[in-house]
Structures are given as structure tokens and as C-alpha cells.
Amino acid sequence: MLFKNKCRAVYSCAVHGNVIAIIDHDGGRSVTNDADNVIADLVSRGFDLQHYHVIYKDTRCIWDQILVDRTGCFAGFSSINERDLPAAIAKLTRH
């Protein structure tokens, strides 16, 4: 799925098991700077984020985690610091 709005982050996402992987397409705001809205988009599309980990690949091609609170709102970031998606998922799901 590609999400595009000139005042918002331009990104796509894919689901890998219980991980939602978001890729920042470097248009508009960055996913990092628009994380509140990115998480709200996922919730509005029916994702129950209590059952998923959310990771994103930033414009430097680094995968990190977007944290979500119990109410389904953006709650910060956590470093994964991986360049490879399978490695990022493995690092995230082994905890």
C-alpha cells in the first residue's frame, strides 16, 4: 500500500507475520516526523496494533521500531539499527 499526501509522509507498508514494515519514500514529511499520523493511518485502516510490531525504513535505509501505546497511539521510537529487513524482523521478534 502506498500512502501519499503532500503535507504528510509518503510511505508504503507490508505485513510480515506480526510485523508491519513501513518504507519512507522521502516525499513530504519523513515517517520519523509524521509518526503520529502514520500510526493513526494504520489504525484507521483496521490494524489492531496491540497484535503487531511496527518498524520503518527511514530515508537513510535503516530499520527502526515505532512504538505504540495501549490505546493505539504513537509512543516513541526504539532502535533496531538494521539495513536488512529479515535481520530487522529477526532482531525485533527474538526479544
Image (spheres, rainbow, N blue to C red):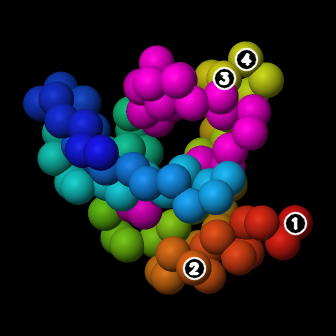
- Callout 4 amino acid: Thr
Q: Give the number of the mark in front: 1 or 2.
A: 2
- Residue 58, placed above or below residue 13: below
Question: What distance separates the C-alpha of mark 3 from that of mark 4?
Answer: 4 Å
- Residue 48, placed above or below residue 91: above
Location of residue 59 in the rendering, given as x and y in whole percent from the top left corner: 31, 63
In the orientation shown, which residue stands out farthest toward the left? 6
Q: What's the magenta region?
A: 35-58
Indicate the secondary structure of the residue bearing disc 4: loop
Question: What distance separates the C-alpha of mark 1 from that of mark 4?
Answer: 22 Å
The residue tagged 2 is: 86
- Callout 3 amino acid: Gly
| Number of residues whose C-alpha sits closer than 10 Å to that of mark 3, classed few (under 14), some (14–19) or many (20 or more) | some
Question: What distance separates the C-alpha of mark 1 from that of mark 2?
Answer: 15 Å
Query: Residue 71 — which label?
Result: 4
Location of residue 32 in the rendering, given as x and y in whole percent from the top left corner: 43, 45
